[in-house]
Image (cartoon, rainbow, N blue to C red):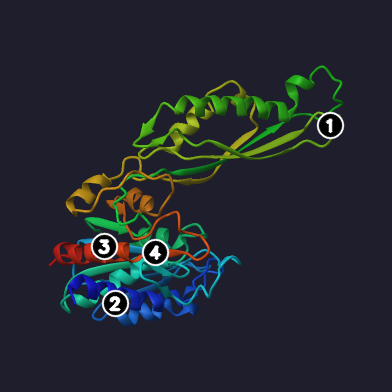
């Protein structure tokens, strides 16, 4: 049996055990699932530290020696769907696929790492960070680890389904809320057109859409514009009453390297924004690379990873980048399979990623 075949065989054995651990998020019960216990037993010679940041946000950080590269994997999955046609916690391996909850997103990467570590010398440097709340919960575990980290790394490989290609750029995410207010009154009053809070909100929405349309001229790779989305509008009391309040919630997704504040400044530059009672940012997640952060494409080149195109979905790689750690997104599986019923990962992608992990750990582990 070739080294590649052996790695794939052990990857699938580990993957079956990992899929059997119920790490659905919610309820974020990773400690109860037994997954961290399984990983800790598999990492012979590693110093393993489990840290609980509350509300199911728990990290497992394992380090052996002085490695240059950190592998990061989130172990939580989305809740199982009623559309599953079989037991989602019982891994099914066919001729081309491995089917199970989390097999694609993204326990396959963790299984590949564990298989590779087994094939390394007992004292070979390596490092692994597991997080438990990427699928919901505000990424508290990743943020908590970054805030208290004691080691820096030349590169962080953040596992997400990228079909075995290195993604060095993706969008950020920003959610905002704008509130408009007016004195209520009879809708026959001359001031209705000017003062109505919903009318004010509508004028500002027009300005936002204009900004978004202008931004379509901006692009990074195949990613274009800022993906402005008006999500909810709440306000008014009756159709014959001047609306006393309007609350809008919207989101946009900055291009890689673009700051959310740059976009916000544009959204607030028009005359309608000046009628706003209040404005607040609900969520602001950086892009990859983060504005002012280290270049991710250089890491991908240095590690010899197959290059991939920028993607629209957000990952925790952006948090590592914002903290000054060069990060790329890299893992087996197709994002189209993530979060689906009967989720699966292709065996050839598991094999390819395991081979890359093996090479990177041997060359860049730190030996």
Q: Residues within 10 Å of mark 4 (few under 14, many from 20)?
A: many
Circle on res. 352: 3
Q: CA distance from mark 1 to mark 3?
A: 61 Å
Q: Secondary structure at mark 2?
A: helix
Q: CA distance from mark 1 to mark 4?
A: 53 Å
- Ranked by sequence position, the earlier of labels 3 and 2 is 2
Q: Residues within 10 Å of mark 3 (few under 14, many from 20)?
A: many
Q: Is residue 196 left or right of 332 when viewed as pictured?
A: right
Q: Is residue 68 left or right of 319 when viewed as pictured?
A: left
Comparing labels 1 and 3, the label whose residue is closer to the camera: 3
Q: Nearer the viewer, residue 110 or 316?
A: 110
Q: Nearer the viewer, residue 24 or 85?
A: 85
Q: Residue at the location (43% across, 49% down)?
A: 314
- Ranked by sequence position, the earlier of labels 1 and 3 is 1
Q: Position of residue 246 (x, y in %)?
A: 71, 35
Circle on res. 10: 2
Q: Specify the farthest residue to the left.
A: 367
Residue 320 can be seen in this image: yes
Q: Position of residue 103 (x, y in %)?
A: 42, 67
Q: Residues within 10 Å of mark 1 (few under 14, many from 20)?
A: few
Q: Nearer the viewer, residue 291 or 7?
A: 7
Q: Secondary structure at mark 3?
A: helix
Q: Position of residue 219 (x, y in %)?
A: 38, 32
Q: Quadrant of the N terminus?
A: bottom left
Q: Secondary structure at mark 4?
A: strand
Q: Is residue 135 left or right of 83 when viewed as pictured?
A: left
Q: Residue at the location (79% across, 19% down)?
A: 191
Residue of label 1: 239
Q: Specify the farthest residue to the top.
A: 190
Residue of label 4: 345
């Amino acid at each position: 049996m070739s080294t590649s075949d052996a790695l794939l065989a052990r990857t699938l054995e580990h993957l079956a055990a990992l899929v059997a651990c119920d790490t659905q998020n919610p309820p974020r019960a990773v400690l109860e699932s037994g997954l961290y216990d399984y990983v800790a037993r598999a990492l012979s010679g590693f110093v393993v530290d489990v840290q609980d940041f509350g509300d199911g946000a728990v990290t497992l950080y394992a380090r052996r020696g002085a490695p240059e590269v950190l592998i990061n994997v989130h172990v939580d999955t989305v809740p199982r769907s009623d559309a599953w046609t079989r037991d989602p916690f019982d891994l099914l391996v066919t001729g081309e696929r491995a089917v199970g909850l989390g097999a694609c997103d993204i326990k396959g990467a963790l299984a590949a790492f564990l298989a590779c570590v087994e094939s390394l010398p007992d004292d070979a440097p390596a490092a692994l960070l597991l997080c438990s709340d990427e699928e919901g919960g505000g990424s508290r575990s990743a943020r908590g680890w970054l805030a208290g980290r004691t080691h820096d790394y030349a590169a962080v490989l953040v596992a997400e389904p990228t079909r075995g290609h290195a993604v060095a750029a993706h969008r950020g995410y920003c959610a905002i809320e704008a509130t408009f207010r007016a004195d209520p009154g009879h809708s026959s009053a001359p001031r209705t057109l000017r003062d109505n809070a919903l009318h004010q909100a509508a004028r500002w929405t027009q300005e936002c859409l204009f900004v978004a349309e202008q931004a379509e001229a901006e692009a990074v790779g195949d990613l274009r514009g800022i993906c402005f989305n008006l999500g909810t509008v709440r306000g008014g009391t009756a159709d014959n009453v001047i609306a006393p309040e309007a609350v809008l919630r919207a989101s946009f997704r900055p291009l890689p390297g673009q700051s959310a504040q740059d976009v916000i400044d544009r959204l607030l530059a028009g005359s309608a924004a000046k009628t706003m009672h209040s404005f607040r940012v609900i969520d602001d997640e950086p892009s990859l690379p983060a504005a002012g952060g280290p270049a991710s494409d250089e890491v991908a080149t240095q590690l010899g990873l197959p290059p991939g195109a920028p993607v629209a979905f957000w990952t925790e790689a952006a948090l590592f980048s914002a903290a000054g750690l060069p990060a790329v997104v890299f893992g087996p599986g197709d994002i189209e399979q993530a979060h689906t019923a009967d989720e699966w990962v292709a065996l050839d992608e598991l094999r390819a990623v395991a081979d890359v992990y093996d090479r990177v750990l041997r060359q860049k582990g730190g030996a």
